[in-house]
Image (cartoon, rainbow, N blue to C red):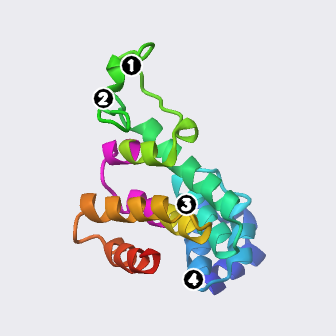
Amino acid sequence: AVKLFQYLTEITPSAIDESIKLIAAYALCSLERYNEALTTLQSVTLNSQALLLLGICYRALCSYSEAEEKLLSALQILCYQSSTEDITDYYGNSLASVSGFQQQQKYIDIFTLAPEERLRAINSLTPSSTTDLIVIQLADVYYKQDRFNIALSYCSNMIEFTDRSVRNIVSAHILMGKIL
């Protein structure tokens, strides 16, 4: 995939659309060629998939604050696309009961929430492998930053709320073992 992408880049760079660049960046990440993946992602519109790949690259390159920012941005896009009407705060209280919150509100700023409160927003999203991968990547970032309690809560949350058929569940159990 990478060789085909490099060939197409040399022959007809204008013919390469963003989906091909995302596939190439994913392949480069799988090959642990993170700097090349970052270069490939520079010309891609920042959607949730691109931001997830950027987060993976930065995490692997030990740029944890950049990784967290990109992963949270990917979550922000997913939250924006999802209805937030049923989201509760960290204590289980409906956000509709909080002063100033309107039931029709469709936007939550994931960056202003504490890491524990973000789990409530994540749990309100429609389960997907993208969401699960973002959560496990965030847990790993927190683990690398020695924020063990947060990392542990993200792993246990993913294990509790994830469909057992999702492949990221194994990674969550392994990471949870490392954290413990």
Q: CA distance from mark 1 to mark 2?
A: 8 Å
- Work out how far the residue at label 3 is from the one at label 1, CA to CA, in angstroms: 32 Å
Residue 17: percent from left, percent from top: 62, 60
Task: Give the quarter of the figure containing the N terminus.
Answer: bottom right
Q: Are marks 1 and 2 in contact (CB under 8 Å)?
A: yes
Magenta stretch holds residue 58: no
Give the Cα distance between marks 3 and 4. 19 Å
- Under mark 2, the amino acid is Asn
Coordinates of residue 126 in the picture (x, y in percent): 30, 48
Q: Earlier in the sequence, mark 3 or mark 1?
A: 3
Location of residue 152 (image quadrant) = bottom left
Q: Is residue 116 above or below residue 137?
A: above
Q: Nearer the viewer, residue 86 or 112?
A: 112
Q: Secondary structure at mark 2?
A: loop
Q: Which residue is mark 2?
A: 93
Q: Position of residue 150 (x, y in %)?
A: 47, 58
Q: Are marks 3 and 4 in contact (CB under 8 Å)?
A: no
Task: Write down the residue under mark 4.
Answer: 1
| Magenta region includes residue 128 | yes
Numbered-mark total: 4
Q: Is residue 89 left or right of residue 19?
A: left
Say which element carries label 3. Answer: helix
Q: Position of residue 89 (x, y in %)?
A: 37, 34
Inspect this view and state whether residue 8 appears. no
Magenta residues span: 121-136
Mark 3 or mark 4: name the one nearer the start of the chain.
4
- Disc 3: which residue: 52
Kindly identify which residue carries mark 1: 98
